[in-house]
Image: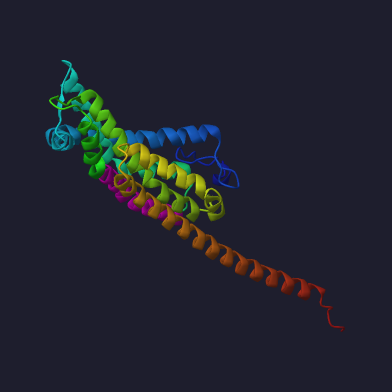
Amino acid sequence: MVNSKDKAPRSNKKARAKDAEGRMSLKDHLIEARNRLFKSLIALAIGTVAGFFLYDELLALLIEPVKAAGGSVVFTAVMSPFDILLKVAIFVGIVVASPVWIYQIWAFIVPGLKKKERRLGYSFAAAAVPLFLGGVAMAYFVLPFALEFFIGLSPENSDNLLNISEYLPFIFRLLFAFGLAMLVPVLMVGLNMVGVLHSKVILKNWRITVFLIALVAAMAAPGGDAITMFALAGPLFLTFAAATLFCFFNDKKRAKKQAAQDAANENMADGTASSIDEPSPEV
């Protein structure tokens, strides 16, 4: 008769082989990436289906800044309407699925989350999604200024006809660039909360970060309009500064807590050593 204690434990497909520090092997990382990507693609597919139903309204919204600037868009190929339909639907899918793929990125960057860290991950996604959508909305808000500048350079008595196959990719790149840029501060805070990114590293490289923010704003507002550039760069600077301050005070609080814990452990060790060294009473 076989003892139940001698039976081999059942394998758990969801388990990940980790070492004492919680690190995973390359194979497990690839499996983790595949699972995260699969979940993101499912959410993207659902959002893309919704994009097909919102196609007419969203396309009119994207073309409106061109009309306001005195231009118009044209379809220059037989397959252009279908191609634009797919691009707009996928754009909607990415925006609608942003809560899912943003959290999946976070969960992949910081794998093996404990219960407390999973709650932090949900908080990260809850803060990141509005910032991503806010960045998209901010880019759309300044878009008419850039279009008005470029279309205004056209000679008099000329028609401004924009190829929609070139216009929409430009718009999507602009919207996504600022949506992703707004995710950087909340990513900084999240990585700092789990001890991956320290405020000393951020403060050491703050000049590079400020330069990159200014460069992105200048590229997204190439019309030479300083007001437009500052309108784009201002929120990025503010969120970066707020994230840096949060990381600084969080590191300070963590260091103070660690010092108190080390002192308590040292006192406990000293008390144990003194009790061992104390001579036993004579009988």
Q: Is residue 214 above or below residue 253?
A: above
Task: Specify the segment rendered in magenta.
Answer: 115-139
Residue in front for this viewpoint, 107 or 1: 107
Relative image position of residue 201 (x, y in whole percent): 55, 50
Residue in front for this viewpoint, 207 or 4: 207
Q: Is residue 120 left or right of residue 85?
A: right
Kindly give the residue lying farthest to the top in the view shown. Answer: 78
| Residue 266 painted magenta | no
Residue in front for this viewpoint, 20 or 179: 179
Kindly give the residue lying farthest to the right in the view shown. Answer: 282
Residue in front for this viewpoint, 251 or 102: 251
| Residue 124 painted magenta | yes
Mostly what secondary structure, the magenta segment? helix
Q: Is residue 96 visible?
A: no
The quadrant holding residue 266 is bottom right
Task: Give the position of the C terminus as an image quadrant.
Answer: bottom right
Relative image position of residue 133 (x, y in whole percent): 28, 46
How many dots with numbers?
Answer: 0
Relative image position of residue 13 (x, y in whole percent): 45, 37
Relative image position of residue 122 (x, y in whole percent): 37, 52
Tell me the residue at 15%/30% (across/down). Answer: 71
The quadrant holding residue 269 is bottom right
Tell me the residue at 23%/33% (across/down). Answer: 48
Q: Is residue 87 visible?
A: yes
Q: Is residue 188 above or below residue 101?
A: below
